[in-house]
Image (cartoon, rainbow, N blue to C red):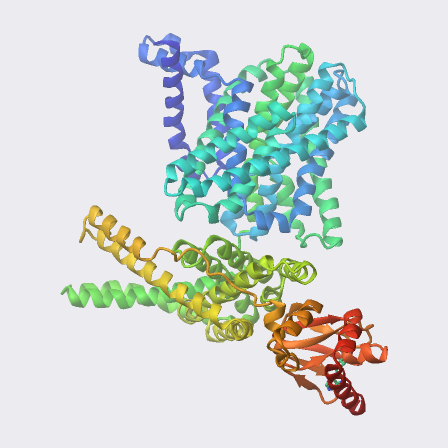
Amino acid sequence: MTSIGLVVFGLVSLLALMSLLPPLAGRLRLPYSVLLAVVGVILGLAVTLRPDQAIPSPALHDIFDALASVEISSESFILIFLPTLLFEVALAIDVRRLLDDIAPVLTMAVVAVVICALTVGFTLSMASPVGVIACLLLGSIVATTDPAAVVGIFREVGVPKRLTTLVEGESLLNDAAAIALFALLLPMLLSGGEGSISGTVLRFLISFGGGALAGFVMAWAACMLFPVLNGWPKAEITLTIALAYLSFTLPEHYFHVSGVVSCVVAGLVLGSAGKTRMRPGTFEQMEGVWGQLGFWANSLVFLLAAMFVPRIMEGTSLIEIGFILLVYVATLTARFVTVFALLPLLTHLGLMQRINNRIKTVIVWGGLRGAVSLALALAVIENEAVPANMRDFIATSVTGFVLMTLFINGITLRPLVGFFRLNRLNPVARGVRDRAKLMTLTDVANDLAEIARAEGIDRDIADKTLSSIEARLGVARARSHRGVELMADEMVKVGLTVAAAHEVERCFDLLNERIVDRRIAEMLLREAQHVREAVRGTGRKGYVMAAERGLGFGPAFRFAMWVQRTIRFEKPLAAALADRFEFLMMQRQVLSDLVPFARDRLQPLIGEEAADEIIKLTARRIEAVDQSLLALKLQYPAYAADLQRQYLGRIARQRESAAYQALAANLVVSGEVERELTAELERHWTGLDGRPRLDPELSAIDLVARVPIFRDLDIKRQQAIAHLLTPQLALPESAVVRRGDKGDAMYFIASGAVRVVVEPSVELGSGDFFGELALLTGHPRNADVVALGFCKLLALKARDFQRLLAQDAGLKARIEQVAKERLNLG
Ligand code: CMP
């Protein structure tokens, strides 16, 4: 065979082998990486010993030649495999959760890497002759953890998702941190230890920060491109692959910042922003592609790196074994200190939830090392510039150490989890499980009886099958009644968690059905995810608080108002109002769907009482949304009508298109006919995706004409007055003036109403004015004035007040008259 032929043959033989390993690992109940390491070492032994030479079989010779020819170099590891390994994990991480726990994640990732590198470095340098920098380099190599084993077990035993994110996030960022550190230390080692500590730290930070920025910008650029590629999933997915590799190589090559960090950040950004920017379905397809690529890369790297182990470990001396043990003890100690000393400190500072000691122990023990450590060691071995004794030292220590973590920690991790009883379901989860079983078995029994009757199956056969189900039902029924009522609160929390997740799904549905556009979908999603996180944190209380906060006016809205007020530029405010309008309408839609969901789907699982509570909470949210929506509708009825028209149009379009798709899927119409029908439908509904324009109706002259005391003036006069007045919008329940403040303006109400907080309170409506007393008397404001709903106001500044009154005796008399009455009342 030719040499390329051999490489291809070797690779596909490995793929064939790899396809058998995951099920085998499952059957042996071993972490997959442990099994990979075992197989890799065996293959490595075989390639070194060449047992085939004793057997005269050309095919066998070829297989061994092929295996020997697929040796991985550190360069191919870095350029071919590393971007995929990093990008795939980053893509799958829930960035919101990661950000919520960013303090512990960064501690575990960056601080722990430094602690580990220092501990290993200084411990070893005391015992070995190779010098402190080589030892620190070794420390950085062994500081990366491979989360696969721990995450796999965590998923199986159902520990809280936050812990899984912590461990995943840790390993992702610590790869980046350790590789960045490695990249700094290696040149230092080669230059004989030149360079100051502060210089190194600074370069580390620049490399890290610059990499993060580069990754962010590149991923963002890709996200902007997705709409251009719309409709071509294969092109979109290809772009993500290009992004992974470009974000890895370009920043490193041209800007000398960390490509690893850049690649990780690009993956994180794409994973969080891509879902709403790609075509529906494409994101899932892309996740599938990346999952597959990640599996190949991880397995291949592991196998290929493990194949080196026999050669590296050949002739290991007793002293070297001593070093390996030392590295093992030092890393374990470093990890112990991080987890048991630093994490509690973070909890103490309120930066992270408490985790119990059993879980902490599992995290310490689960710090397995994997492909990245092996490949970094390989990079040192291949580097001719590194002195030979250091190369041997690093190679054997790292390899031996990785094997120890895999074979000792990897194999004992699951028993440890069992020993700590972490694999036991908590009572609430057990309650849900029992009810789920009850619900399902009841449905199955009913269906089965129905099918047996309809299809004329023998009575006694049907009865026999049914009675076995009945027996299981009996057990489930007995169990599901036990103790569940005691945990109504917990059940409400479970129910709310599911409901919140359903809310997130509904937002995606609306986006996929093109009922909402991307921006509004993103707003809805952000809100739904907030609610979901809040439930996870503080249950019912968190839910209520997050829901309330979601209806408030955010900083962007307030900024838009400020822009309108100060420079009379209305566009941002118009956009903010339109966004809010649509957001509220769509949120109403999402929430109204939750009620039947709670009744039909949740109730069987969490019981009637808890489901009722959830329905009540949802109803309260709907009411609050309705109120906010009403406030807007009262002010902008025409826009509300436009939005409703558009909404109905979008529903009609979605129904029609879904119906055609269903017909085509059932082969009632051909694909061609479906395409034609869809094209006609799209033609009919053009213009549905743009947004109707909202006019905030804040033009001074229009508003002046609506205030009775100005209405009868001639147009010239009105224009002069309008010149002095600043139109502004007041938000529902916001205070326009506050008692005790100095008076700087008075206000005319052009539309809407306000409440003057005096005893008893007074409501003022369109045409009324307020805030005149402070200007006339020079005293502080004598009451709070709060907007009821949205109000359009005309503000008259103190200095213009005198001017206007001087020009218009009638107005002056009117204002003074009203002021006198008000003062007398007070
Ligand atoms: P000022 O004191 O500048 O700020 C609070 C405003 O509330 C005040 O001006 C009046 O415009 C208004 N106000 C105070 N008391 C009454 C009242 N009894 N009836 C109506 N408006 C009032």
Q: Nearer the viewer, residue 667 or 456?
A: 667
Residues 14 and 349: in front is 349
In this rendered view, identify the residue nearer to me: 484 or 641.
641
Quarter assignment of residue 803: bottom right
Q: Residue at x 46, y 61 (%)?
A: 692
Tally the marks: 0
Residue at 26% x, 58% y: name it.
Answer: 659
Please, is residue 279 above or below residue 58 in the view? below
The answer to whether residue 296 is seen in the rendering is yes
Q: Is 60 rendered above or below residue 718?
A: above
Q: Quadrant of the C terminus?
A: bottom right
Look at the image and tell me whether residue 734 can be seen. Answer: no
Q: Position of residue 24 (x, y in %)?
A: 41, 35
* Front-most of residues 414 and 117: 117
Which of the 4 image quadrants contains residue 263? top right
Image quadrant of ligand 1 equals: bottom right
| 248 sits left or right of 125 in the view | left
Please, which residue is most extreme toward the right here?
778
- Residue drawn at (58%, 16%) of the image: 312
- Give the left or right position of residue 5, taking residue 618 as reference: left
Q: Residue 367 vs residue 231: left or right?
A: right
Residue 813 placed where, x, y %?
76, 85
Residue 625 image position (x, y, % from top left): 53, 71
**526 with respect to 742 (left or right):** left
Residue 243 in percent (x, y) is at: 50, 33
Q: Quadrant of the N terminus?
A: top left
Relative height, residue 21 to residue 759 (above, below): above
Dividing the picture into quadrants, the one containing residue 435 is: bottom left
